Image (cartoon, rainbow, N blue to C red):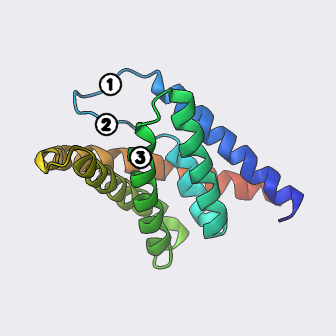
Amino acid sequence: MKLKRLTELSLLTAVALIIFVVELRFPDILPIQGMKLGLANIITVYAVFVYQPSETAMIVACRVLLGAMFSGTMISLFYSASGAVMCLLGMLILKKFLSLDYIWLCSVIGAIFHNIGQICAAMLMMRSTAVIWNLPPLILFGAIAGLFTGLCAQVLLKRMKNIKKL
């Protein structure tokens, strides 16, 4: 891997991690566990459309691992990793069928997959299907948050293209 590319990936990971840590300070929006805006996913969505799948996976893996360490809750690593893997796989598959004009849609689907991954992890950890009742509100909120992060990633992509042209 070239040094320039590694530096770009490292900076994107750092930005995603900073956004994640700042978002931890936001108060809970609704009383459902795990309901967050997922602002760090702006970087993930951007990376899905700009970098190789393996490079994007490295960004996500580092953010999830370091995010769990920085948040002080290593048990959340299982939930975050489950959601992140499902989200990333969904977005990488969907990217093949979407143009750059539909990044927002890829983000919405990724957010829904993220919630499904987290609920599956919760069912495994708790050995109960009772948490499935949290899925409908999580999907609804995730779709709205995914739309927001996707639109932000679309703006970021356009701005970064203009910067690279200079």
Residue at position x 24%, y 28% in the image:
30
Under circle 1, the secondary element is loop
Q: Which of the two discs, 3 and 2, labels the residue nearer the N terminus?
A: 2
- Left or right of 7? Residue 68 is left
Please tell me whether residue 96 is drawn above or below residue 159 in the rendered image. Answer: below
Which label number is shown at residue 78? 3
What distance separates the C-alpha of mark 3 from that of mark 2? 16 Å
Label 2: how many Cα within 10 Å (few below 14, some 14–19, many 20+): some
Residue identified by numbered label 1? 28
Report the residue that reaches farthest toward the bottom. 97
Q: Which mark is residue 35?
A: 2
Q: Nearest the camera: 98 or 32?
A: 32
User: Residue 27 appears in which quarter of the rendering?
Assistant: top left
72 on left or right of 140:
right
Q: How many angstroms separate mark 2 from mark 1 (CA)? A: 7 Å
Instruction: Name the quadrant of the C terminus.
Output: bottom right
Label 3 – label 1 distance at C-alpha:
20 Å
The residue type indicated by label 1 comes to Asp
Q: Residue at x 45, y 74 (%)?
A: 93
Contact flag, marks 3 and 1 (Cβ < 8 Å): no
| Kind of residue at disc 3 | Phe
The answer to which of marks 2 and 1 sits earlier in the sequence is: 1
Q: In the picture shown, does residue 109 fall above or below 41?
A: below
Asked which secondary structure carries label 2, the reply is: loop
Instruction: Give the amino acid at mark 2.
Output: Met
Q: From the image, state whether disc 3 or disc 1 is nearer to you.
A: 3
Q: Quick check: can you spot residue 36?
A: yes
For residue 23, above or below residue 133: above
Q: Which mark is residue 65?
A: none
